[in-house]
Structure formats: C-alpha cells, structure tokens
C-alpha cells in the first residue's frame, strides 16, 4: 500500500470517525479514487450538519476574533471547529485561526475538507502556517501536512519547504499528496536546490523509492525532467532506474 493510499484512508477514517484499520478493504483503490470518494462524502456530511454549523458561525460573527477563538478552544472539539470553518467567511475564519494556539490548529487541520481549507489557509500568515507545519512535523503527522501543502499557494509552499529545511519531511509529505495539481504546484514552487535534495533523499530510502517513482510518474513530463536534472545535473536525459542508487 502506497503512502498516498494510506493517507487517504486515514483522512477518510477521520472524516467518518472510525479506526483506519476498519477501512483496510479500500486499499484496492488508487489514492485518486479514494480522494474523490472522500471529497464527495465530506460534501454530503457537511450538508447534513450545515444548519448547525451556520448557527454557530452566526454567533461567532457577533464577537471579536480573540473572544471567538477563546470560546472555540474551550467549547468545541477540533472536528466541530473544522465544520464551522465551512460556514464562516474565509477572512473571518483566518482571523480567528490566527488567535488560536498552534496545537489546537494542528488538531483542526486533520478534519478540514479541502474545499473549506484552501480559502482559509491561503489567508493565514506565513508565521502561522509554519508554526502549524512544525507542530505536525513534531507529531510525525505527514498526512495532515500533505493536506496543508495541497491547500497552499505556490509562494506559501516554497516558503514552508525552505523554512523547514527538512528534505526528509518534505519527501514524506510529497508521497502522501493525492492531488496531482498540488504535486505539480509543489514542483513548480520549489527552487532547483530544494528539488535536488528531495529527490536525492527519497532515492536513498529503499522503502520510499517505489513511491518516489510513482510520484514522478504523476508529474507532467516537463516538470519530471526538471526534477531529474536537479537531482543529477547534466544527466537529465538518462533513464531513471527502478532500483534506488
């Protein structure tokens, strides 16, 4: 089972509120298929709970962001807070998020749907995004980190990747991204020296090598050549081996 498939099953389990092992029968599907199913399920579940989330969001709009953040932290579990995000205007949600402690924000990210996460995350400051990314890295929660990276703009992606200065973590995150557009955005955003580190680190880990090959196969040909050229300067036309160097 690839890391991307495992990550999608973990995300779906978090959405459904069940252990990931109960969904092991889904491993026969691709990460892209599981992602499509997860997004559809999230839309359906949010529709069922939308009236409740809207009522909570209306109450929150009447209070300053700091007061709403303090109330949210004390009164709401992370999964409920993530649902309320979908009913808030993105800018207001970002203002509240900026007032919440990093550990709580990290918990919330595990339950955010991509549709509600993207417009909020792209409005957060680089400092908040980086703080949450570091918290998730300390937890080794690469699945949640992959979801955040998928929601970031190209500029934010480049900032986080370079500020973390941790190619091993970025490889673990990259192989868990199931959205091809997010992978392409990641490759386009990162400078060649960072890309070189990612490919070289991944190629040295036998367990990750098949997943790195799969990842390269999902990147458009022009981007793939850039990755290989960054990893092996002057040898970009040489076919990549299925065996790690």
Image (cartoon, rainbow, N blue to C red):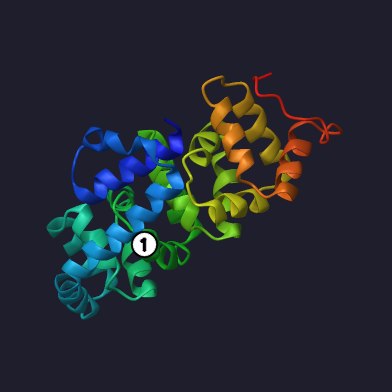
Residue 136 shows in this picture? no
**Against 205, is 76 above or below?**
below
Nearer-the-camera pick, 194 or 26 = 26
**Against 71, is 141 above or below?**
above
Q: Position of residue 101 (x, y in %)?
A: 30, 52
Residue that appears at 17% across and 53% down: 77
**Against 65, is 153 above or below?**
above
Number of labels in the image equals 1
Q: Position of residue 79 (x, y in %)?
A: 22, 54
Q: Position of residue 177 (x, y in %)?
A: 48, 45
Crowding around mark 1 (Cα neighbors within 10 Å: few <14, some 14 to 19, many 20+) is many
Residue that appears at 32% across and 60% down: 40
Nearer-the-camera pick, 116 or 165 = 116
Quadrant in the picture for the C terminus = top right
Q: Which residue is mark 1?
A: 98
Quadrant in the picture for the N terminus = top left
In the shown orientation, is residue 25 left or right of residue 138? left
Residue that appears at 71% across and 43% down: 224
Name the residue furthest front: 28
Residue that appears at 29% across and 64% down: 43
In the shown orientation, is residue 165 left or right of residue 200? left
Residue 59 shows in this picture? yes
**Against 97, is 208 above or below?**
above
Q: Position of residue 78 (x, y in %)?
A: 22, 53
Write down the quadrant of residue 64 in the picture.
Answer: bottom left
Tag 1, which secondary structure?
Answer: loop
In the shown orientation, is residue 192 left or right of residue 218? right
Write down the quadrant of residue 66 in the picture.
Answer: bottom left
């Amino acid at each position: 089972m690839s890391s991307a498939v495992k990550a999608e099953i973990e995300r779906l389990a978090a959405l459904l509120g069940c252990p990931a092992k109960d969904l092991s029968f889904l491993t026969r599907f691709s990460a892209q298929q599981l992602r499509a199913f997860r997004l559809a399920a999230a839309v359906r579940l949010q529709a069922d709970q939308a009236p409740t989330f809207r009522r909570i969001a209306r109450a929150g709009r009447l209070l300053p962001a700091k007061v709403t953040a303090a109330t949210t932290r004390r009164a709401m579990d992370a999964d409920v807070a993530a649902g309320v995000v979908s009913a808030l205007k993105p800018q207001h949600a970002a203002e509240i998020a900026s007032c919440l402690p990093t550990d709580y924000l990290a918990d919330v990210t595990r339950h955010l749907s991509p549709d509600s996460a993207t417009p909020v995350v792209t409005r957060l400051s680089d400092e908040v995004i980086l703080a949450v990314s570091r918290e998730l890295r300390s937890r080794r929660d690469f699945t949640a980190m992959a979801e955040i990276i998928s929601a970031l703009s190209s500029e934010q992606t480049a900032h986080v990747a370079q500020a973390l200065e941790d190619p091993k973590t970025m490889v673990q995150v990259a192989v868990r991204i199931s959205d091809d557009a997010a992978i392409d955005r990641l490759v386009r955003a990162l400078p060649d020296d960072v890309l070189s580190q990612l490919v070289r680190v991944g190629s040295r880990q036998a367990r990750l090598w098949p997943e790195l090959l799969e990842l390269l196969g999902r990147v458009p040909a022009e981007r793939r050549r850039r990755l290989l050229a960054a990893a092996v300067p002057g040898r970009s036309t040489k076919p990549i081996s299925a065996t790690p160097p």
